[in-house]
Amino acid sequence: MLARPVSLGILPLALALGACAPQSPDTDASGAHTAEALPEDPCALTLEPMPPEEMGALKNRIRHEKFDQVLPVVMRANDIDMWIYVSRETLPDDLGHEDFGDNNAVFIFTDRGGDRIERAVLGRRFQGAEFVAGQGSDVDPLEVSGAYDIVGKPVERAEDPGMSGTEYDYRFKGIGAFVAERDPERIALNYMEKLGPRIGGRSRDGISHTDYILLARELGETYASRLVSHDYLMHDYISRTTPAEWEFLTHMREYMLAVQERDWCRIVPGETRFSELDSVLWVVSKDGDRIGFREELYPGGYSSETDYVIQKGDTIYLRLGYFKTEGLVKEIFGNYYDGLNEIGYVLDDGETEAPQYVKDAWATSLKVHDIAERHLRVGSTGREIFRDIMAEVEEAGIMPLNSQVFDENHADRIQVNLDFHAAGQGDSTLFPAPRLGIYGPDWNHEMPFPPGHHFYFEYFLFMPMPQWDEGSLLLQSHDGAILNEDGVLFLTPRPMEIRLIK
């Protein structure tokens, strides 16, 4: 693991953010001081993303571990003898493209007994497609990865004079004989059937209708009749993470924390603007105004019309990979997601600590976090765990909330909304996965949590503030975590204090 200690804002700024501290000049043998060049940015990043070649090697380790450790378990648990996954470059598909390794291939995983699943890459696969180096290299990454037992040779994307038929005539050529030789009883194919997306959500439905027809024709009536949706199989495959994935996610999170550390260092009350911070999510002023809280994402939120300048008395929420930096994180880390909200308070004149209302809200937030963590367990469904958590939350005098908006009809009550949805690989609105809370279709809540499940420890806590127009102080947790048989694993230490900024 790449864990690092998390510095907390209870320290003075110069100590908490060592990158901002001045350096002592060196002294030569004559006693004269030699000037030392200062960095251009005193709040420079302390961690850069790992080089692309190292990241590629780590992703290949993930692929090996998933194939070795996860595939046999999930295929047999779902009574699947063969998994055919058609990846087509014209259909956005992060799982096929990034995780399996190509955006125009047919991946076939076959259970032939023993402790290992046979892995093959077949179909008409183009040399020079995005996954191949494409800059004059003839190296096939899938072949050199060692993850596949059988790798069909790619072909050049070129029009051949005199060739009969169209591309459709060659797309699945030979796959029918390959399948017949293995004679699978149940064949999972990458289309969705039962595990549809949440209402209003986006969807990636898998194979195109054209490919389905062409593949069925190639397989013949006997094997085409054995095709079933891969939705439950894919859910199980994605939901179970491996140690190499934990290493990848830990590095990802370390980078996010380094960017957020730089943002904390850059904050100067009365000077620093939103545009100068990479991970700012929103700010709550001492008068209760929520600034930068996106109305289009959360009803009742506010969009900042100006480039807000952070002021004394502000409560600040940071999270990299959201709003303006979402694309940046995906560009660096690909089909993986993680996150961590960090909360800080800018000391006002005469203050040495956060006001009592902020400390009370933080203490209540930690209480909710601890209650939820105690009840999370492998093998239980989201519905079962949610029921247990909410019972203890209510015993603590906190009102369960059926939305992520403060209920003004109960303005005197502390309120909380939980939404523990999948993280890690893909988007939980695009891929099926277990979920705990009130959102999502019923199947989300009826699925047991598997070992190694990566999810967001997300909740919205509203502390009543009747003196504010908004009526509440909102604290949000959005902390990525792994659920194992031994409980919840955080890939970096969770923040236990509010960061104080002078």
Image (cartoon, helix red, strand yellow):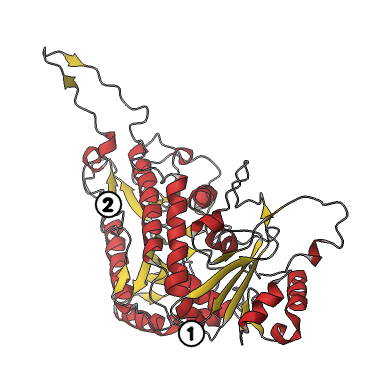
Q: Nearer the viewer, residue 288 or 165?
A: 165
Q: Measuring 58% from the left and 79% from the top, which residue is drawn there?
A: 82
Name the spot of residue 3 as percent of width and height, x first. 29, 54
Q: Residues within 10 Å of mark 1 (few under 14, many from 20)?
A: few
Can residue 276 be seen here? yes
Residue under label 2, please give it: 4
The label shown at residue 278 is none
Image quarter of residue 200: bottom right
Q: Measuring 34% from the left and 45% from the top, which residue is drawn there?
A: 261
Residue under label 1, please give it: 77
Q: Nearer the viewer, mark 2 or mark 1?
A: 1
Name which residue type carries label 2.
Arg
Q: Do the numbered discs 2 and 1 sit on residues whose CB atoms are within 8 Å?
A: no
Can residue 435 be seen here? no
Is 109 rendered above or below residue 167?
Answer: below
Q: Is residue 330 left or right of residue 136?
A: left
Where disc 1 sits, the SS reads: helix
Q: Residues within 10 Å of mark 2 (few under 14, many from 20)?
A: few
Instruction: Pick whichever of labels 2 and 1 is earlier in the sequence.
Output: 2
Name which residue type carries label 1.
Ala
Name the spot of residue 287 as percent of width and height, x first. 40, 50
Give the quadrant of the C terminus: top left
Q: Is residue 58 left or right of residue 2?
A: right
Q: Is residue 354 left or right of residue 320?
A: left
Q: Nearer the viewer, residue 478 or 75?
A: 75
Name the spot of residue 327 as percent of width and height, x first. 55, 49
Q: Nearer the viewer, residue 244 or 114?
A: 114
